[in-house]
Amino acid sequence: MWSLALQKGSSGLLTLVGVATVVFFLFNVLGDPAQMMLDQNASEAQRQKIQQKYGFDLPLHQQYFYFLNDISPLSIHSNKPDALNYFSPEKYNGYSFALGGTRLALKWPYLRTSYQRQGKKVSTIIEETLPNTFILALSSISLAVVLGLLLGILAGYYKGSTLDSCLVFFSTLGMSLPSFFSAILFSWIFGHVFSDLTGLNMTGSLYEMDDFGEAQHLQLKNLVLPALVLGIRPIAVIVQLVRSGMIDVLQQEYIKTAYAKGLNAVQVVYRHALKNTLNPVITAVSGWFASMLAGAVFVEYIFGWRGLGKEIVTALNTLDIPVVMGAVLVIASLFVLINILVDFLYIYIDPKANPF
């Protein structure tokens, strides 16, 4: 178990370093960060001042080291007060330890500050928006699991029937529809054309300001359409996986033995058949949940859902590069963490899957 944890942890760490490297060089080679922070009428003197303050005038490899130092939980800092990488508890929210002429800091990763929001921390922006994206993703995947399992079981049990043909058709259609197209379609039909019947809005977030602009109120109805749209493709995938697994399992000899012992169809499916179809479903659910955190960009933007995806689009439009970089790193970290947890979940379900 510990060997597996070490292997997965090392692999995840290397993945995150690779993502951080690609993100840093991609956004630092494509433009001048100092110019992005200033308007078009800014003078050359102002640009140089910004470059010196944030270290944009340093060689690229040195900027890269400072970037890794900032996002690393364990970082090295100079004791010189004029050093660019000085340690500040207010800046890093961590603990420092003296080591010769330097200090080691144990801290939360510092994702730097926004270019466009008067020095607001990127971590603060992510803290404000990530919970909404997490709620949306969790609602979507929960809906997908419940409907996908139920419809997949029915399709597999009644293989070759009209019900099976309809479910296969709609699941294939669901896998083919792009999320942004489904979002536009559902928003217009259920949030505009039939809004009087559904009571749903075309756009809206989890919390909405009242008409007087004095307080925010929880609006769960705004979760319905984006959760449904984001869950369409996972539902389709789970239906196909469960159907295929059920067809294979129901042909096994131990299923016939279970029927011979007097068990009814519900007992056979629940006690024997369903368990042996869950492994591919777990893989799909974990992958889709992690990808939903990154793939909700268009859905959130179209429905006006104030989540991390919408924040990324806004940051790209305003060239707020630190927000984009920080969001990508957080999503990559969550993706790695979820994959590691799923590997251990496999071992819990099937101990024989442990390679060590």
Image (cartoon, grey):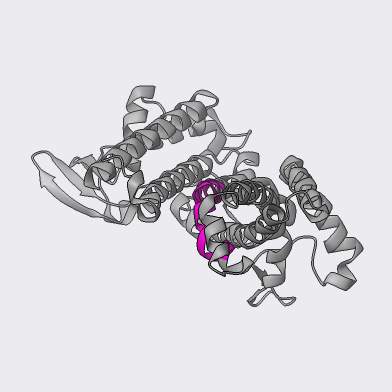
Q: Report the front residue among 264 and 112.
A: 264
Q: Report the front residue among 258 and 199.
A: 258
Residue range in magenta is: 268-290
From the viewer's perspective, is residue 241 above or below residue 258?
A: above
Does the magenta segment cover residue 279? Answer: yes
Q: Position of residue 263 (x, y in %)?
A: 57, 69
Most distant residue in the front direction: 260
Residue 57 visible? The answer is: yes
Q: Residue at position x 36%, y 47% from top?
A: 110
Q: Report the front residue among 189 and 307.
A: 189
From the viewer's perspective, is residue 146 above or below residue 70?
A: below
**In-image side of 130 versus 309 (left or right):** left
Q: Position of residue 144 (x, y in %)?
A: 64, 57
Residue 112 visible? The answer is: no
Q: Position of residue 67 (x, y in %)?
A: 36, 35
From the viewer's perspective, is residue 54 above or below residue 133?
A: above
Q: Residue at position x 86%, y 56% from top?
A: 188
**In-image side of 347 versus 245 (left or right):** left
Does the magenta segment cover residue 355? Answer: no
Q: Residue at position x 53%, y 67% from top?
A: 261
Q: Report the front residue among 256 and 163.
A: 256
> Which secondary structure type mostly characterizes the magenta part of the structure?
helix
**In-image side of 312 versus 75 (left or right):** right
